[in-house]
Image: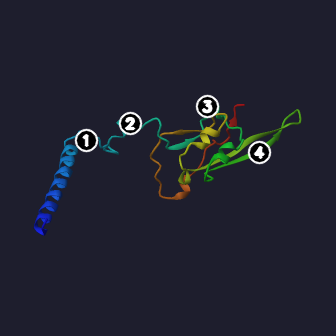
Amino acid sequence: MNSFAKYISGMMGGIKSLLIGMRTSIRVFFRKKITEQYPENRATLYISERYRGRLVMPHDENNQHNCIACGLCQMACPNGTIKVTAGKQELEDGKTKRYLVKYEYDLGSCLFCQLCVNACPHDAIKFVNDFENAVFTRSKLLLQLNHEGSSCKK
């Protein structure tokens, strides 16, 4: 095969691959568009229930939560995002009981792996699908999950 024939066959191969690529592009061009026009469509925006956006500690109407300050979530967290501060109080019968003083969560270093939620034996924490977590200062990503004056249900 001479050099001219190699040149022509190479050019034909290039044209063939170009046409295949253009065929794919034309198919995609005529598909129904699924782009979300955020933030204009905030009211109708669908977010999957499986999306993990932010960790929260649910409280009831009496400002009570389920956290017993066992620290399992803190131990399960792979990068130290959670810091549980517990206190001890002495009961009437002489036993001591742990209670939650402060539950700190660093949203900026969270991996959203859900290991903390899976480790919690009392379902005290869960992920919600909030996705607007952008801030200008990193200190605003340090959250205290337990409300002021809250107590444990149990």
Find numbered disc 1 in the image and state the secondary structure of the residue it sits on. Answer: loop
Please tell me whether mark 4 or mark 3 is closer to you in this view: 4
| Label 1 Cα crowd, 10 Å radius (few <14 / some 14-19 / many 20+) | few
The answer to whether marks 1 and 3 mark residues whose Cβ atoms lie closer than 8 Å is no
Earlier along the polypeptide chain: callout 4 or callout 3? Answer: 3
Q: Position of residue 39 (x, y in %)?
A: 35, 45
Q: Which residue is mark 3?
A: 60
For the residue carrying disc 3, how many other residues have a C-alpha within 10 Å: few (<14), some (14-19), or many (20+)?
A: few
Any mark on residue 46, and which?
A: 2
- Residue extending furthest toward the bottom: 3
| Residue situated in front as seen by the camera: 92 or 128 | 128
- CA gap, disc 1 to disc 2? 16 Å
> Residue 92, located in which quarter of the rendered image?
top right
**Is residue 68 found left or right of 97 in the rendered image?**
left
How far, Cα to Cα, is label 4 from label 2?
A: 41 Å
Looking at the picture, which amino acid does disc 3 mark? Answer: Asp
Which residue corresponds to mark 1?
Answer: 33
Of the numbered discs 2 and 3, the one sitting upstream in the chain is 2
Front residue of 42 and 20: 20
Q: Amino acid at mark 4?
A: Gly
Q: In the visual, does 133 lie left or right of 77?
A: left
Which of the two discs, 4 and 2, labels the residue nearer the N terminus?
A: 2
Q: Tell me the crowding category of disc 2: few under 14, some 14 to 19, or many 20 or more residues within 10 angstroms, Cα based.
A: few
Residue at (63% x, 53% y) in the render:
80
Report whether 103 appears left or right of 131: right
- Residue 87 is labelled as 4
Q: Position of residue 36 (x, y in %)?
A: 32, 43
Could you tell which of marks 4 and 1 lies nearer the N-terminus?
1
